[in-house]
Image (tube, helix red, strand yellow):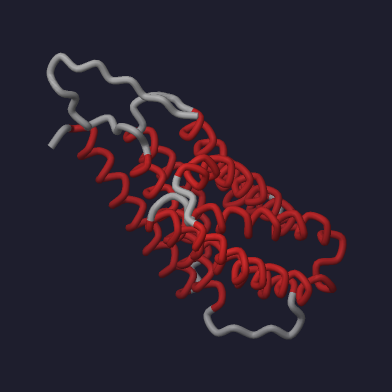
């Protein structure tokens, strides 16, 4: 196995271990461990992407930008507790917009009329949650509305990639829906909501990035035929 691929797989193993430790810390109420592990999610996914992408491209740049925004949402809210919701929503709004931009070309190239039907359930979930949570959002209502649109768009476009991106986008939608109910829906009571949010978010995020890595025209460890010239065209 090429060393770069071994490093890539090791990073995915480290990400999975970090997720398990974080979720266990949330369940045990170990706030220090939770706060240490959560900011590691995005950097580990960045490293996994960089060890796979053979060169900088539109897709890899958008994904790295999205992961940076996700890191802001995961990390900076801990530094400014009074603005935790605002920072988290703003960070992940940026991530969703960049992920949607990265997914859009794949949707166009693999367009399937049956996939348009996904707009109905995804849109219904987001609209229903927005209406239910509008009163609790307060001054964040415009940002929450923009987040809802970006979330539905990203989840919808994720079906145009592959099974990994589709599963990741759907879990991202579920995670954000649970978080919105937890934050903005008065009286909502979901057992183990925090644990479910973190589990669906981390698995969904990982699947989304893994799916996009699989969609790369070439990965660092992909061998070229002897004497062949490789031309990569990406819109």
Number of callouts: 0
Give the image quarter of residue 138: bottom right
With respect to residue 20, does 192 lie above or below? below
With respect to residue 168, does 29 lie above or below? below
The residue positioned 48% from the left and 34% from the top of the image is: 59
Q: Nearer the viewer, residue 186 or 217?
A: 217
The residue positioned 41% from the left and 25% from the top of the image is: 233
140 horizontally vs 213: left or right: right
Image coordinates of residue 89 in percent, x first then y, are: 69, 55
24 horizontally vs 223: left or right: right
Q: Nearer the viewer, residue 18 or 235?
A: 235
Q: Which of 10 and 124 is in front in this view?
A: 124
The residue positioned 31% from the left and 49% from the top of the image is: 12
With respect to residue 63, does 174 lie above or below? below
Image coordinates of residue 45 in percent, x first then y, are: 42, 44
97 horizontally vs 37: left or right: right
Image coordinates of residue 69 in percent, x first then y, are: 60, 43
Give the image quarter of residue 185: bottom right
Pick out the residue farthest to the front.
113
Pick out the residue farthest to the right.
139
Give the image quarter of residue 156: bottom right
With respect to residue 211, does 62 lie above or below? above
The residue positioned 49% from the left and 63% from the top of the image is: 114
């Amino acid at each position: 196995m090429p060393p770069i691929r071994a490093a890539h797989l090791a990073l995915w193993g480290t990400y999975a271990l970090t997720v398990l430790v974080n979720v266990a810390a949330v369940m045990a109420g170990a706030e220090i461990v939770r706060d240490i592990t959560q900011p590691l999610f995005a950097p580990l996914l960045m490293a996994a992407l960089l060890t796979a992408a053979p060169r900088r491209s539109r897709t890899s740049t958008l994904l790295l930008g999205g992961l940076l925004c996700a890191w802001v949402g995961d990390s900076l809210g801990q530094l400014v507790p009074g603005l935790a919701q605002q920072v988290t929503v703003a960070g992940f709004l940026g991530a969703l917009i960049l992920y949607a931009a990265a997914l859009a070309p794949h949707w166009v190239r693999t367009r399937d009329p049956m996939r348009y039907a996904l707009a109905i359930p995804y849109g219904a979930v987001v609209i229903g949650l927005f209406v239910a949570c509008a009163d609790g959002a307060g001054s964040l209502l415009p940002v929450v509305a923009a987040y809802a649109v970006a979330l539905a768009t990203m989840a919808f476009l994720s079906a145009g990639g592959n099974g990994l991106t589709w599963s990741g986008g759907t879990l991202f939608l579920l995670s954000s829906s649970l978080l919105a109910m937890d934050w903005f829906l008065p009286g909502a009571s979901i057992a183990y909501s925090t644990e479910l949010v973190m589990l669906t978010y981390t698995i969904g995020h990982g699947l989304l990035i893994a799916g996009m890595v699989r969609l790369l025209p070439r990965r660092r460890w992909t061998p070229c035929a002897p004497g062949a010239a490789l031309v990569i065209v990406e819109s």
